[in-house]
Structure formats: structure tokens, C-alpha cells
Amino acid sequence: MSDYSEIVIIGSGFGGAVMAARLGAHVKARFGDSVRVEVVEKGGDHTAAFDPTAKGPPLNAQGNRFRHTYDLRYLAGLTDVFTDIDGAFRAGVPSFNVLAGKGIGGGSNVYAGVSLRAPAEIFAEQQDGRPLWPKRYSRAALAPHYDSVAKTLHVNRLRWTDKDVPHWQLCTKRDLVFAEGCRRVGITALPVPLASENDANEGWWTQGQRFSGRQNLSQNYLAQAKAAGVRFSANVEVQRIEPFEKGYLVRGVDSRGGAQKPFERACKIVIVAAGAIASTGLLLRSRPHFQGARELDAPLARGAAEGILGKRVSGNGDYGVSGRIADAHAEAVESHKGKPIASFCPSLWKQHKVLILPFHADPLYLALGQISTLLRADRPQAAGRASARAALGADGRQERHWGAAYKARLSRFSERVLSMGCLAVDENEGEITLGPSGAPQVRWRETSVRTERRWNAALDAMRRIYEALGGEMYLDGYRKDGTVNTSHPLGGARMAEDGRYGVVGDDGQAFGNRNLFVVDGSVIPSALGVNPSMTIAAVAESIAARLITGDGTESLEARLAA
Amino acid sequence: MSAVSKRNDQTTARAAFSRREIIKIIGALGLPTLSLGCGDPNAQAQPQPRPDAGAPPDAQAARARYRDNVAALMDVLIPAERDARGAVTSPGALEAGAEQVLELANLVHLLRGQGLLPPLPASFTDGLDGFDGALRALVNADLDVLAFAQAPLTPFRRLAREQMERAVQAGFDDPLRRPVFELVRTACFVAYLGAVTSDVGLRAIGYDPFEDFAGGVYVSGYPRRRADGSMDDYTYNRAPAATPGDDLSGVLDADGELR
């Protein structure tokens, strides 16, 4: 017999954490301990590593137990990389890599904290002549929820000088170099709003941070959920959801304690919030158990030849490059120090729907050439995947990605290498399918003309910034290998006004399946063009508020009483 | 048999077999019998006499440090720099612990999971989890095969540096060999820039030393006092000059958010 929780939330990132905090607090106030809310998370629980009050090994100088290392064994507990297993990197075949956070806190374990709100025009995005977003969603409608997220995550706008703010609230050296490059090509860099407080300007943000610095969800939403009595089960991977008469059966593998054993939990309400890729993968695995009117892929239930589940996934227009500035430039970049992203350039937004951001890029990833590359583009390349697949050196030979010359280039990493990238409104060219083992894999269809045009505009601006600083842009991963890399996947189980075009409605509930919700990046129906954590959390706040008040949907009380 | 006739025999052998066939033969024969000087993968470094006369004595000393061909390959991929007495002045992959990284359990799985392994055939990555002694012996022997094309009867680890580099390039250029070379290269960079067993690589590119390497803890936190007593500041605390003519009023609202 399976154990029972009234509400099971699968995943603990920006969707799951918000739902756990808000529903947990409401249930606690309304029902006391008689209603059980449980968060199930595939990865481990890193909370104690952040929490100076937790038991464990001695604290480090930053007041936590978090390590600063790229040790693979350590990183494997924090991140997942989804890729195109079948088609990856073959000549002429688009490929797609998606970096996702893992463990309690989900994406917040690896995010940069940038907390921009999606522009109003995003909510009017259309595809095939039809609005992508349900009518309920607009920048104005989400405003109070954005405010709530900003307050909970301690979002502070950074500054260039410490005239009016504490010194920790400043942009990094990298940002001033970037701003000067922008100025020289006629565009403007500005500080970002950041989910951070007294972060001490540390580097290694994604691998380790002071507990009171970067706003990991463990220290805000998830802490509130725990205070409300929500139960957390880490190291439990849900493999499928099955409907039954009174609710849902959540089945998976429980790896707590080391040994693997079956996990089974019956529940009345299930909230899928494992992130865009993992949630869509879970729904795809569960789809055979939902038949007829309960078909998980609503268009299929309505007789359509093709479903929407797993289709039209956005990479949020992520496109990273690296390059160097002139040796003679007065200021060093020191890209490894300080916050990972602290400024952005919005000057191209109006015309091209792209933002440019300088970012801390791990030298390991640059050297290995997947996210970007330290190889130079000595021979000019046309933009686009059809262009050359390898950087060519000045002598026409392929430039080596090893040896003394490559090592020498790395030695200037901290001083002269500047990485930047763009976020753009792409056209949802990604796709999620199930691999042979049932794990989700991602694929990039051919890049649309519009996306290509936007990337080209950003690339041209970035190239001019490097050149204005006396340097050069190195060949990027997309041009080199045809690889699209993103850490901001969106869609896969998108929301829609009605079941012809989406998997869930505007309340996050799956069409045809009462009490089955999806609340994370997978429901976001379009690219956002900004870092998505704020918007995912704001949408989750909106859905939670409607469930609690019964505004336009069945209330939580009614659902639990039924 | 004279040295000349030995060389002729080798030439004959190279004409009769493709490199792929040689690799298969080496594997079938159990490897060490054909590998000239690549040695026991578990043996400690032993100075060896070197046939490539003409190289400077410091180069001879450096090469004598290589435990085997795989270690020499690592030193080609990310070379250490040495002074005239052979002391390391700039660490390379070996000094950063690349051999330990290569021996990590589940290495291939971990590298793929982090997106660090470049495109490789599934037949290679699926069938290989780590870099065990048998594979190391195979690679040792294969490096000697590549070395023969540069200097017949000279083990890879005793080639001149330029010859080693040409042999390694040949390895990367060969689709059959490329997966192994990419795996070793990735292990080298993970060691050099990943602070798995040492922070010497990161320090070489400008990172501060770790405060506690055993705990994997990097010195961070602002403000931090340098050894000379000054404070390390990660900011310039300075506003950039305004960009003339770039009016963002239609893009940003009063709060600085995108409209």
C-alpha cells in the first residue's frame, strides 16, 4: 500500500518552491497538520551546506560548508545537462544542450540571480497568428506577483558606485569594461536587479556562496515551506504519474540511504514542477497512463494528429561568446571575481528583441569548448550553422585546442578574456523527446529566420564591442559546432487559453485532468528575452494565489474536501 | 640485426598494415610486448636512456619523468614549463593531477553529465566508463604506433617535443583514435582548471590560492586583505561615461525595468 500525502509537489525550483511555500502556509493555517504537503526532489538536499546553523563539518571562511570546486563528483550533485543524444554534433544536424539545476532549490542552485521582469510585449507574443499567452497574463497582471517575488528573494538593483549603497551592491570590474565597450559602439550598459543581499562580491557564485549572499531558494521560499510543515523527500526521482479514481499515484525510485527502492505515493493533488525538461519528460513517460478524455496532451484528446507535449521549446535565445580585449586596455576584466552577471545592455531591445549581458564564464567550460570556446575566429565566418565547423588559424590549419599556445591563452584568462552573451526572443525551435532509457533528451530544429536575425544583431554588436576594446571575438559554439546552448529552457508543457494549443490552462491545471498541475518553466509559452527565474516564480505566485482564493478556478479547500 | 635492417623491417610492417589494423593487433597480443618502453602502467617514473640524441639535456631530464606514454601525452596537451635545471616554473596537466582525474570512477559518465566531453561516438562512450589499466596499456601502445611515424623504433615518450606534438595531432585527426585523445584532453583540463586534486592550474591563470584545498574551499569574500596588506576589491567603484544619443526612455520604465 502506498503512502499518502494530500498534495505532492515534484521539484523544488522556482515553480515548486513557490507552490510549496504558499500552499504549505495556507494549508497549515486552514487545516493544521491534518493535510500533508510533500515536496519530492530528484537531487540531494544541499541546504545544510548553505546553512551556518546546520550540523556538519566546520564552517569555511565564508560562513558555510559549500565547496568551491569544479570537481565532477561534486558538480554532478548540482546540475544536469540534457542533450541531443541521437543527433548531437553530427555535421548538419542541429544540436541542443540544456544546463539545469538539481537538488533541493532546483535552478536556484546554479542561477546567477538576475531578476529582470519580462517586458509587456512578451505577453502579446504570437505564433501562427494566435496569441501564445492566455489572456490572464500580462505584465500588469503579474506586477503584484513580481513584487512578491522581489521581496521574498531580496532583489536589489546593483549600482556602479557605492555613493548610496553598500559596497557589496556594486557591479564588477568586468561590467565597467563591458560598459566602456558598449559606450564606444553607441549603446548603454546598466546594472541589473539581483536576487542577492550582502553577497560579499564573491566569485564562484554558481559553485558556492555565502548563505546570506546569493538568494538560493533554500533560504527563502523553501525555508517558509519547511516552517509551514511541508515535508521534503530528496533523492527521490519520480518516473511516472498514474491517475486513479480518487487522485494520482506518483511512482519512482527512492535513493535515500544509498540503496534504491521503489517509491510510491498516492495523492489528491499533484503539482509537477521539476523544470522545463524534466517535467516534460515526466509527462511524456506518464502519457500512456492517461487515456481518452484524460489524455495528457490535450490536442490529442481532441483528435489532433499531433500533440503539443514536448514541442516548441524555447532556449530563451541564449547565445554565448567569448573573446579578448586589448592588452593595452587600461582596466583588467578579472572576470572570475565578483557576481556572475551584474550588468546588461538593453539598447537593442526595441529593434531586435535582444539583451546583451557580460558574464562570468568558467575557464574550464571555455577551454573545453562546449558552452563557448577559447579558439579564435582568425578567418571571418558567416553567421549560421552552415558555416565552417572548425576555427582556422592564421596559417589555414585548424587551431589546436591543446598545447603550449592554448595554455598561454588561458594564462591571460583573468585579465583579458571577456565573455558575453545575449538573451533573445527565439521562436521555440527546441523539442523534448524521450530517449531509449526513458530519460528526456532535447533537440533543436532548424533555427528560424527571425531567431537567426536576432542572434546576428546581437553577435554583430558583441563583435563590435570586442573590437572597440581593441580585441576580438572568438568563434562561438553555435558557429563552430552548430550547438545551441541554454540554461534557460522554457516550454514543453505550455499553457494556453484552450486545450487546442496547450497542455495546461491559465491556472496551471492540465486540460482534462482535475488536480494535476504543472507549474514551472515548462508552462511558459514563449521566450521571455530576460532571465526567466522571476517570471517563473511570478507565474507560480499567480497560480498559487488563484488556488487559495478560488479566483477563476476551483479553490484548494474544495479540491481537498472533494 | 643491424639498426638499419630493423628500420627496414619496421617500414615493411607499416606498409603491410594500416594503423587501425596495428591497433587491433596490439590489443590481441596483449600490448606490452609490442610497446617499446611504454612500461607498466603502474610503475613509478624511472629515468630511461634516450635514443633521440641532439635534444638538450634538460629535455632529456624532463622526458625521463614520464611514467609512461599517457603521462607524456598529458604533458603535451597541457605542458609544464621548466627552467634550465628542470624545475617546474609553470605547472601543466601532470602537476595539476590529470592522472588522478583520469582514474576517477564513472569518469565518462561524469564528464557527459556536465557537458564537458566533446562529441564522441556512442559506441565509445557507452562502452567505456573509466580509464582502467587495460585501456591505459592500449593507449600506451598506440602512442608508440603513432610515434613510429615520427621516428621509427622510438617510443612516444622519448620523441622530441615537436615530434610528440605531430604524433598527438595525428591522433586527434584520426577518427578512430580521436575519442581517446578527447577523453584524455578533457581529463587534463578538468584537472588543470577544475581544482579536483590541486589548484595549481587555476592559480596559473590568475585565481587566488584555495584557503583549504582538502575542503575544496576557495578564498573569497570581500573585502579580503592581500599579502601586502592592501584590500582586494572586485569592483572599480566608478560609473561609466554616458553614451551620447542612446535614449533608453522608450525601453525602460521609471524603475529601470524593461517596459
Image (spheres, grey):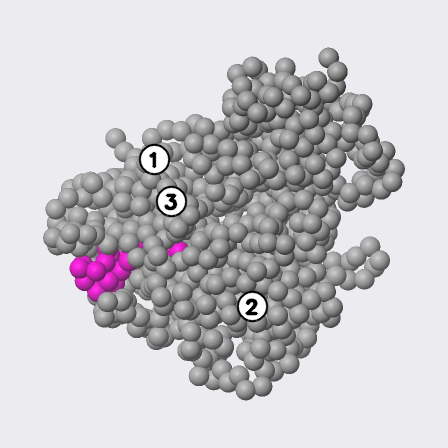
Q: Quadrant of residue A503?
A: bottom left
Q: Is A502 inside the magenta-drawn segment? A: yes
Q: Is residue A472 left or right of residue A124?
A: right
Counting from the top left corner in percent of width and height, residue A455 is at 44, 66
Q: Quadrant of the N terminus of chain A?
A: top left
Question: For numbered disc 3, what is the local secondary structure?
Answer: loop
Specify few, some or many for label 3: CA neighbours under 10 Å numbering under 14, 14-19, or 20 or more. some
Q: Name which residue lies at 64% across and 81% down.
A: B241
Q: Is residue B174 left or right of residue A42?
A: right
Report the amino acid beneath label 3.
Gly
Closer to us: A243 or A554: A243
Q: Is A373 inside the magenta-drawn segment? A: no
Q: For mark 3, what is the residue?
A: A87
Regarding residue A492, the answer to whether it shows in the image is: yes
Chain on which label 2 sits: A
Question: For numbered disc 2, what is the local secondary structure?
Answer: helix
Q: Main secondary structure of the magenta part?
A: loop
Circle number at residue A463:
2
Counting from the top left corner in percent of width and height, residue A408 is at 71, 51
Q: Name which residue lies at 58% across and 49% down.
A: A398
Closer to us: B10 or B112: B10
- Co-location on one chain, circles 1 and 2: yes
Counting from the top left corner in percent of width and height, residue B253 is at 45, 81
Q: For mark 1, what is the residue?
A: A437
Closer to us: A545 or A111: A111
Range of residues picked out in magenta: A488-508
Q: Name which residue lies at 49% across and 77% down.
A: A347
